[in-house]
Amino acid sequence: DCDLIVTVGFLLGDATAAAAKANPDQKFQILDFAYSDAHDNVWQQVYATQEGAFLAGYVAAGMTKTGKVGTFGGINIPPVTIFMDGFYNGVQKYNADNGTKVEVLGWDPSKPKSGLFTGNFDKTDDGKTFAKNLVDEGADIVMPVAGPVGLGSAALAKELGPEKLMIIGVDSDQFESDTANAAVYLTSVLKNMDVTTFNAIKSVVDGTFAGGVTTGTLENGGVGLAPYHDFDATVPQALKDQVEALKAGMTPVIYDPERR
């Protein structure tokens, strides 16, 4: 007798679709997934994480001392590479705006088969190894898009110190969630599942619930960029102002089912 059933992640896509079809009067919300065909009783919540990652890439390009930043993923799938695309494009935007030549290691959207991927989302040792390889190539800021694997990268950054390596977190504010390594996080790309789940619950309460795809964007608060926390005094005000101007002027992303 639940008014709303919320499922999380693409691995639950088939099960949620089957349950929704078998129970057409039951309301569902699935987070981080959408269907290519109609599911009128399923609120399909996706996130334009490339928008937040774009800002993170811009910040990284403005903060690097070596002129090289890096990223790697867990598995080469769209929910991962969408972060990496945004990060890469944010660095390119910074270069265009500021006449710099910051290089991105680990990912180039024009050469997706050559990107760096650990092949898993759980081996923290891989996170440490991949981050160390990027540091050895000259990167001093790294964005792991690999779930718990990224904790290994943060542990390495704690060992090396912020002058050698800073980390950009993903999904949640990892300064708050990875307290053991909080001081290494320059910022995080936020996927605000609390906001989007609240919106679905509210729609059930007020009678406006509708199935279909809803995209979380910077504009509607579904995605965002975390505070700079311990690095706040280090990030130049001019860079902060550039990021805020970008945020205000960005055109919301339209959901593309081919990139789900």
Image: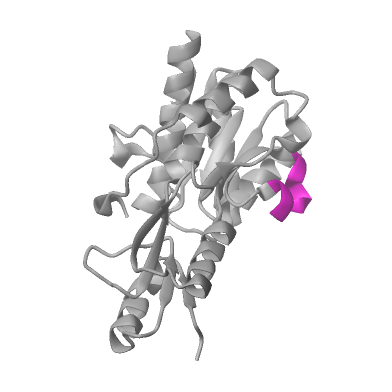
Most foreground residue, 186 or 134:
186
Determine whether, in the image, residue 65 is placed left or right of residue 253: right
**What percent of the width, then of the height, locates residue 215?**
40, 52
Q: Is residue 177 a member of the stretch shown in magenta?
A: yes
**Display coloring:** one colour
Q: Residue at x 61, y 52 (%)?
A: 172
**What percent of the width, then of the height, locates residue 26?**
39, 84
Q: Is residue 86 a member of the stretch shown in magenta?
A: no
Query: What number of labels is visible?
Result: 0
**What percent of the width, then of the height, locates residue 254?**
32, 45
Q: Residue at x 33, y 37 (%)?
A: 114
Visible residue check, residue 95: yes
**What percent of the width, then of the height, locates residue 148?**
58, 57
Q: Is residue 102 above or below residue 160?
A: above
Q: Is residue 97 above or below residue 213?
A: above
| Farthest top residue in view | 99
Query: Hey, which quadrant is residue 239 in on the image?
Result: top right
Q: Residue at x 66, y 32 (%)?
A: 165
| Farthest left residue in view | 37
In the rendered image, which quarter contains the C terminus?
A: bottom left
Q: Which region shows up in magenta?
A: 175-183
Q: Residue at x 54, y 47 (%)?
A: 221
| Farthest front residue in view | 206
Q: Is residue 206 above or below residue 151?
A: below
Magenta span dominant secondary structure: helix
Most foreground residue, 221 or 69:
221
Determine whether, in the image, residue 115 is placed left or right of residue 36: right
Most foreground residue, 231 or 153:
231
